[in-house]
Amino acid sequence: DKDFSIGYCPDNDGDRGNFVYITQEGKAEILQAQEVFALVVAIELADADKRHIRNQAVAVNGPTSGRIDAIAKLFNAKVFRSEVGEANVVNLASALRDKGYYVHILGEGSNGGNITDPAKVRDPLNSIMTFLKFFSNKELFNFMMERLGASKAELSIGSLLNALPPFTTTGAFSSVAKMHVKHTDYALMKTKYEEALKATFPPSFLKESEIKSYEIRQTEGLVERIGTGPEFRTGLCKGGLKVVFKAEDEEDLGYMWFRPSGTEPVLRVLVDLKGNKKALHDNLIEYQRALIEIADN
């Protein structure tokens, strides 16, 4: 029904909203978790940049899509990452404010919820308020489309979504986004994973791609460390491990990521790639799962 622009339903504990928008063709489309977060971040950063607020930053978790980095760059903001966990992201935002950054929007893109200052928890009503800001301000929409390098279009969620930098990301609730493993010695598992990665990289399907090298980034609490080996991990080593893919000129092209779940006996698994690259994404998620199986065995 084209009389409607957007609809949402919160989950049972109210920290996540499932959003649906109506396309210009009159079709109802569900927004993925990373898409909701990307839209909200883009609107809030653009609104602040349009009002000449400087020193903007966004606090996110490790598996939040690199799309956020691309959006932030367009609206003069920086992105900082913490370990998975709402408290980690909120505490990182607080630490950034102490350093003089303006941090109005934060959250875990991989969960689809945003936290809008002064809130300290996810609430889809915050997302609704951001979308209302967007729908009620044609000047803001035009400003965003110009910065995004997009042609003029009807003010709609679909128009903005199509204008955002394209990324291909594993769905948070996809069947390939989690793995059951036998072992819980995550320190040893990560070491074995790094060894398997070094021994098999690049896999044959990457030979003709832009991806030429990688670096490993690991998050614990509010800290992100760059480096391979046990010296870049502490304690039970339950933080996220990210393999960031590099082009020949060292540009980040995407990443593979995994982390032990804090709520289920599984590993969370994700691939995020710059551009519309479903075939490469599917190959990489299969490769990632194979590396974890090697490490687990």
Image (spheres, grey):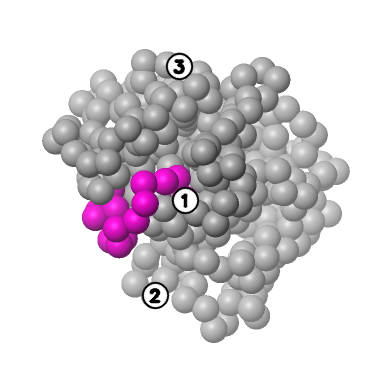
Main SS class of the magenta portion in the image: loop
Q: Does 164 appear in magenta?
A: no
Taking 253 as reference, is 267 above or below it? above
Visible residue check, residue 195: no
Q: Secondary structure at mark 2?
A: loop
- Mark number displayed over residue 248: 2
Q: Residue at x 52, y 66 (%)?
A: 276
Neighbor class of circle 3 (other Cα within 10 Å; few <14, some 14-19, many 20+) is: some
Residue contact at pointers 3 and 2, CB within 8 angstroms: no
Distance CA(mark 2)–CA(mark 1) = 34 Å
Residue contact at pointers 2 and 1, CB within 8 angstroms: no
Distance CA(mark 3)–CA(mark 2) = 40 Å
* Magenta extent: 144-158
What's the amino acid at mark 3? Lys
In front of the other: 139 or 31: 139
Residue 292 at what x, y percent from top left?
Answer: 73, 54
Visible residue check, residue 127: yes
Q: Residue furthest toward the bottom?
A: 208
Mark 1 vs mark 3: give the one in front: 1
Distance CA(mark 1)–CA(mark 3) = 29 Å
Residue 129 at what x, y percent from top left?
Answer: 41, 25
- Mark number displayed over residue 120: 3
In front of the other: 44 or 225: 44
Neighbor class of circle 2 (other Cα within 10 Å; few <14, some 14-19, many 20+) is: few
Which comes sooner in the sequence, label 1 or label 3?
3
In front of the other: 183 or 154: 154
Q: Residue at x 49, y 72 (%)?
A: 211
What's the amino acid at mark 2? Glu
Residue on which disc 1 sits: 158
What's the amino acid at mark 1? Gly
